[in-house]
Amino acid sequence: MSDIIPKHSSLPGNMASEIRMPAPVCLIENTEGQLVVNQEALEILSATKNPLVVVAIVGLYRTGKSYLMNKLAGKNKGFSIGSTVQSHTKGIWMWCMPHPKKPDHTLVLLDTEGLGDVEKGDKKNDTQIFALAILLSSTFVYNTMNKIDQRAMDLLHHVTELSNLLWTVSSPDLDGVEDTTNFANFYPDLVWTLRDFYLDLEIDGQLITADEYLEKSLKLKEGTDKSLQNFNLPRLCIKEFFPIRKCFIFDSPAHWKKFAQLETLRNDELDPDFVQQVAAFCSYIFNRSKTKTLSGGIKVNGPQLSSVPHALFLANNISISSPCEDLKSLVQTCVNAISRGDLPCMENSVVALAQIKNSAAVKKAIAHYDQQMDQKLQLPTETLSELLDLHGACEREAIEIFMKNSFKDVNQKFQKQLETLLEARKDDFCNQNMEASWSRCSALLQAIFGPLENEVTQGIYSKPGGHFLFIQKTEELKARYYQQPRKGMQAEKALQRYLQSKQSTSDTILQTDLALTVKQKVIEEARMKAEAARIEAQRLEAIQRYNQQVMEERQRLHLEQVRRMEMFQEYQLRQQERVLQLRFQEQTVNLNREIEDERRRLHNEIQDLQRNIVSQDDTCILL
Ligand SMILES: Nc1nc2c(ncn2[C@@H]2O[C@H](COP(=O)(O)OP(=O)(O)O)[C@@H](O)[C@H]2O)c(=O)[nH]1
Ligand SMILES: [Mg+2]
């Protein structure tokens, strides 16, 4: 095992975990066509807590990859350089060192076994190593000879697809992946190195930069015929997978005869242009290479990088149980997937890529639909068309999103799948809408009719005429129920169902009402009779009282009259008496006078007589 020298062992935190390796170690060994993870290398990687800048180089064998990586390491020796046609690096080699420009960062150089080694004759392993390098790195150096040609383009394209597939099969659960095409989150930046570049960098007499040369090589051609599609497809994929791209050209480092001793040559013994180009390359890598960063800006450290699948899950916002799983599970899972033969063969990779992209497009479209519906739909809707209109609008947006993100959707297989999913969601929303309407209406009915039910329980309507009152109240409450907004489509059905359920109550109230009414009638009649009798008695009594009063009055009047008559009679009597008395007195007076007159007369007569007698004396004596 290589020595790990902690640079600042007394310092706390990540500074204490800085690794200096005197020489590279094999991370993934390629022995007899099998990829085996080197546990020692994993442990070294796990020891660093620093953010990692991971630079991996891939390309055909014996194209000076190891030599260039040694330049990055600032060493002449390190990664094994083959001076014969037999490629020296078997698998992926790793060299960790303090980052020359970023304090507290670890630079991890990954050198890969050259592609296309005639001795191995196993292309599958080549591309698997290639794909692993893409997944592990933050800067991916693609090393090719002479110029950018179609073969190099196709190779990069296929391996990029393969790395994508490797990522897919290494991720046990992609259901939560929001956007599987969001490669930029975890895909490395691409640096294309062109060795022994011999072309003039000019177009139409205009000098161009290496980057412009790369972009020109990746330019799509317009048209739809098959050959153009074959031309465009790898370019499209490369552009999409590697949005950040850089190109470096290198002259031949020295005369070919010196190649065997190249690693021993000093800079002044090399081609000065090459030296300058290497310096520019190293400067770019040191200054511009990003840390291996997960989605959301989480920087990868050793233990995380060692968990490739987990890192990838994180990159897609998938929660993982243990984010500090070490590189073992990262590399191990990928290597296991490769060993199990989970990767589809390369010929199918375009189809597989299309499937991945289209599945992702379906997921993205569905996610958009779900998000929009979630945001805009308020259940229950008043009408079905309200729901269907909203579904229609969100469906259109979802299909648009799918269209934008889909890729080679042969026979609209995925679009149909999307439509089926949307249809299912629509049905689901319709059901939910009905359920929501039912619950809302049930709650409303309970709230509105609850007091009436209480009144029924209290027997308020168990009286003659109670049924009418009950019906009247029910109608009032129905009107109130109808006034409530957002009842949804179950409004009428729920009401009718409720009323039906209360029909027996209504019937009971009616029966009670009728029974009580008959009884009440008898009672009422009796009461009326009694009342009539009472009134009659009262009337008679009143008449009697009246008569009595009249009689008494008459009596009184009579008595009064009698009294008055008596008084009058008395008065008359007294008057009569007085008259009589007066008359009597008068008669008495008269009588007395008469008597007196008589007496006088008699007296006179007597006297006359007497005188006569006297005068006749002797005639007679009368007595
Ligand atoms: N033509 C050429 N050969 C190079 C270059 N750089 C290194 N070499 C030589 O190519 C041979 C293979 O180098 P190596 O780095 O092992 O290639 P690798 O297989 O891609 O890693 C060695 O003899 C190197 O000296 C280069 O830029 N151009
Ligand atoms: Mg090599």
Image (spheres, rainbow, N blue to C red):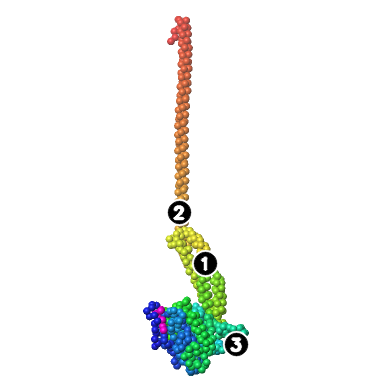
Image quarter (top left, top right, bottom left or bottom right) of the N terminus: bottom left
Quarter of the figure with the C terminus: top left
Asked whether residue 142 is in view, the answer is no
* Disc 1 versus disc 2: nearer the observer: 1
- Does the rendering let one see residue 610? yes
* Residue 313 in picture, x, y percent from top left: 46, 80
For the residue with label 3, is its CB less than 8 Å from the closest atom of ligand 1? no
Q: Residue tagged by mark 3?
A: 227
Camera-side mark, 2 or 3: 3
Query: Which residue is at a point 47% across and 66% down the rendered structure image?
Result: 443
Q: Secondary structure at mark 3?
A: helix
Coordinates of residue 292 in the picture (x, y in percent): 47, 80
Which of pointers 3 and 1 indicates the residue nearer the eye? 3
Distance, label 2 to label 3, CA atoms, is 111 Å
Q: Position of residue 7 (x, y in %)?
A: 40, 81
Q: Seen in the image, is 322 located left or right of residue 228? A: left
**Residue named by callout 2:** 526
The residues bearing labels 1 and 2 have C-alpha atoms spaced at a distance of 55 Å
Residue 473 part of the magenta-drawn span: no
Above or below, 50 relative to 453? below
- Kindly identify which residue carries mark 1: 486
Q: Residue furthest left?
A: 10
Relative depth, front residue between 442 and 454: 442
Dividing the picture into quadrants, the one containing residue 336 is bottom left
Closer to the camera, 241 or 208? 208
Q: Identify which amino acid the numbered label 2 is placed on.
A: Ala
Q: Which mark is residue 352?
A: none
Boundaries of the magenta span: 14-20
